Image (cartoon, coloured by chain):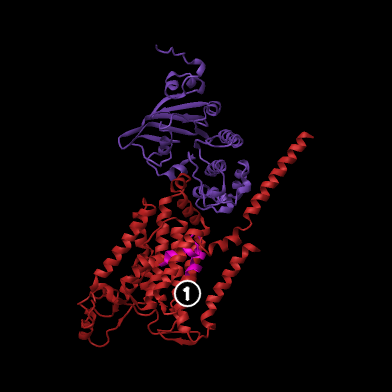
Amino acid sequence: MKKHIPHIVGALAVLFLVAFPLSYRGTNYDYIMHLWITGLFYAILASSWSLLAGYAGQFSFGHMAFMAIGAYTTGLFSNYVFLSSAATHTCTEFKLGSTYLVLLDPIGVTVAKQSCLDLAQAAWPSGVVVTQPSLLWGIVLGVLVGGLFGLVIGALVLRLRSAYLALFTIGFSEILRAGISAEISVTRGQAGLEVPPLFPDGISLLGVTFSASDKLPPYYVMLFLFLVCMAVMVGLERSRFGLFIRSLREDEEAAAALGVNTVRYKILVFVITSMMAAAAGAVQAHYIGIISPNILILLQMSIVIAMAVIGGLESIVAAAVGAVIISFTIEFLRTSFTIGSVTIDMSIWRLVFFGLLLMLTLRFRRNGLIHPIFLWFSRGGVKQETVAKRMAARGDTELDKIEDLA
Amino acid sequence: MIRLEVNDIRKNFGGRQVLNGVSFKVNGPERIGLIGPNGAGKTTLTNVLDGAIKPTSGTVYLNGKRIDPLPSFKVAQAGFGRTFQVSRAFRRMTVIENLYVPALALNPTAHRRDFREQAMEVLAFLTIEHLRNEYAQALSGGQLKLLELARLLMLDPAIMVLDEPFAGVHPKLIEIILRYIHRVNEAGKAVIIISHDMDTIFSLSKRLLVLSYGDLIADDDPQVVKKDPTVIEAYLGQDEEDEPVNSQDG
């Protein structure tokens, strides 16, 4: 029974997450929903990073880079890709049957500039239809591009371990950040790229109409993505994949000597976790509405690492739970307070608190704060079982001796 | 029929010749000892055989298939298994999970449950069945050696190299390891044992290979090797009673 408690709690947690937006009636509804969406976003990142680092032992600092690849791919897709029933003759375009796939010229940062499509539309007769492809394609493309980069990075870091892997992935992340910042004409650099909401025209669910800015639809999209990612990761963890990536974390050479194709699994884990990070980034980009290269700064990566470490690096679920708890804690710690004449600005000091918690966890609880609770349920009886079996074996031996003497 | 052919293997590490044209053959379920002083190239030879490092030149064939250019995991799948001088168990995995790794690596469509019974049998044979759910890091040094041997049984290779299986192991566990070696050998597998424990290796082996500074200086019956002057000079030394009494100068 004890072993099943985490499963029961997990099922109840899923029910709670599904029912919460429908039952919560607080006046701060939008704010709390925003916290949940952000919490689930970080939960996907922290748990997928725990699969990469905690299970496979690949301490990559490039996870947020894959998130950004997803975000920017869908951002660029929604800003640059259109479908037209007539040729523009001014934009880059590809004929797909009776439709043209139109790619806009770089938009730059000035709003005054007219796009090639605007110019074409001015010259077109009435009746030409211009539409934007479904944003879902942008998200799917983001996931695929994230996976492709994961494949390349995974292949490049095959021979790198520990500090070298960390430095390489920091380098990759910084190059990407610098590249996005530099390509102002395409990405709008630090000015930020605007990304349309997930449902630009709103959506009707069970007879209720939600506007583009309502929190409920993006919440369920993020929750759906979170649950899919968790289901995939838990499935992988329990399969040969989970076993093999843990073996290569422990000892790559020994795993290979036992027949494990370490190259395949090392690359696969990069691809899978990169795709998940990219998916989270793509959905979050549509939810937030604007993305900038600052989503790639090392502090963001540090937050994800800290969430996974504090939750429990070697447990996908613990990392996700840790991410949600810390995401909420960071937010609630924003409130500044005054002691005598001194005002403590918690918008800054909360990160110090967070850093201290990380250091203390690493020093005293390397398994994290949540993971040991799961272990207590799942492995609490192992020690007693071992001792009991040993005693039983000794008892048998003693019995054999007595029988022999007799 | 197991057939391993090692042909003129040479290995340089930055100009240092570690293996200098080593050649030998294994025909059938032989029980072979591999000895030599520290730095003789025993572990390097094992690493070359298992594909962890590539030879500078030379070839290795296992049952007619050339294995020296293959990556380690393919060599293992081809039927070559090994243990390591210092135990390399997967410490943050349970004992039984350690056993599932080679079993599943060899059987792409199988599940853990398919090997549970076999794993339990293997653990029982090696007397560590009661530890099956413990993390390997909780095991003693000797038990870790047994765990490595158990993993090898799950890999079920045609030929296995055991690198220092008796080093730092309690005499009772050595008995278990000896029983293991006899069992796998009787089951038709070739076993090469690397050890510095001369008494055990001479009594256990039916054939002895001696490496010295990258050269294979002997390959014969242990009793013949024991008396080989080259081997005595390079590695074994002379028994005290055989040593000439040196007259002191002056």
| Residue A311 in the image, given as x and y percentages of width and height | 50, 65
| Residue B103 in the image, given as x and y percentages of width and height | 53, 48
- Callout 1 amino acid: Phe
Please identify which colour was used for chain B in the image: purple
Q: Quadrant of the N terminus of chain A?
A: bottom right
Front one among B243 and B58: B243
| Residue A396 in the image, given as x and y percentages of width and height | 72, 43
Q: Chain of mark 1?
A: A
Q: Which residue is mark 1?
A: A328
- Highlighted magenta segment, given as a residue range: A303-323
User: In the picture provided, is A284 more to the left or to the right than A398?
Assistant: left
Q: Total marks drawn?
A: 1
User: Residue drawn at (47%, 60%), measured in percent from left and top?
Assistant: A362
Which quadrant of the view contains residue A52? bottom left
Relative to A174, does residue A192 appear above or below in the rendering?
Answer: below
Q: Residues within 10 Å of mark 1 (few under 14, many from 20)?
A: some
User: Residue drawn at (37%, 67%), measured in percent from left and top?
Assistant: A299
Front one among B129 and B233: B233
Please identify which colour was used for chain A in the image: red
Front one among B234 and B63: B234
